[in-house]
Image (cartoon, rainbow, N blue to C red):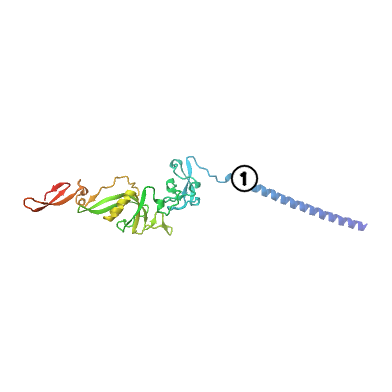
Amino acid sequence: MLQNNTFARSHRRRSNAQLMKVGLGALIMSISLAGIIASIHFSSEQGTASTVTAPQNIIEPGMVEVIVPIESIPPGATLEPRLFHRVKKPEVLVGPEIIRDFEEVKGLYSRGVLVVGQPVHRDFLTSLQPVNALTASIPPGYRAIAISVDAISSVEGWAQPGARVDVIWVTRDLGAQMAYVVAPNAKVLSANKKAEGATVDGKTKDEEVPQTVTLLLSVRDAMRVRLAALNGRLALVLRGSEDAGLAKAAGPIGEGALFNSGTKLQAASRRTVSVKVRDRKTGKEELLTFENGQRVQE
């Protein structure tokens, strides 16, 4: 009987141990399942929250998107979308000539300098690959012509690419020094072979006094400048940034105007001619002076 009791107690202990193992396993599975459910629920909430709060590219009424260069792009450069980014501009300021999408610049080249942060105008783009940066800046009907300059004739070197100048011609006419404007409102394309937008170490180099400058002129003005360079001296007169060049160019001026400033008579309109005349009766020669067709009495 004692043996039976011992066997019964031993059997109950094994049964209790098995029940404990089963209960522990069930508890572990319940905790794991709860963790999985909680993780799925938390992830779902995060996804929902991110979906709801994600920033959206909303364009305000009256605004449109355009593309602008991230950095200034020199003439002749191959245009790629990575060189631009989108900005919003008032629709009233954006005409059909302004580029709005990256796809519109693919495969094109810059005809002029594309300024950083400024909308891109279609007139500054071309589908023809320029030979170099300078040819990209020459519109149809215009020519580029180089002239020699120094510190004085280049306005101490301030006549840099992008500047506007008047080309002054000083020559001797009828025995007097005269000054003429032979090419008004000309654009400087390059100075010492540095075109507009060219940089040195990330900075525009404009402090150098050039020995030559290249000007953008009409065909006729280019011929006038070349002819004038062979028959006198050329100098550049720098224009202001806000001078649109609409005012009528000044007329010629002569040495006499230095002494007659403030009077209505301009030396530019004076023509003085001296001729020798022989008296038929006496045979003597006399020097006669005529100004604007009228004899000047000595």
Which of the pair 245/193 is nearer the observer?
A: 193
Q: Is residue 239 something that shows in the picture?
A: no
According to the picture, the residue beneath numbered tag 1 turns out to be 48
Please tell me whether mark 1 sits on a helix, a strand or a loop: helix
Residue 125 placed where, x, y %? Answer: 44, 48
Residue 200 placed where, x, y %? Answer: 42, 59
- Left or right of 287 on screen, residue 197: right
- Left or right of 163 on screen, residue 58: right
Using a 10 Å C-alpha cutoff, classify the residue at mark 1 as few (fewer than 14 neighbours), some (14 to 19) or many (20 or more): few
State the count of labels.
1
Residue at 50% x, 47% y is 103
Q: Is residue 195 above or below residue 246?
A: below
Residue at 77% x, 53% y is 25
Residue at 60% x, 46% y is 49
- Left or right of 2 on screen, residue 104: left
Residue at 84% x, 56% y is 14
- Left or right of 29 on screen, residue 143: left
Q: Residue furthest right?
A: 1
Q: Is residue 91 something that shows in the picture?
A: yes
- Amino acid identity at mark 1: Thr
Q: Quadrant of the N terminus?
A: bottom right
Residue 56 placed where, x, y %? Answer: 55, 44
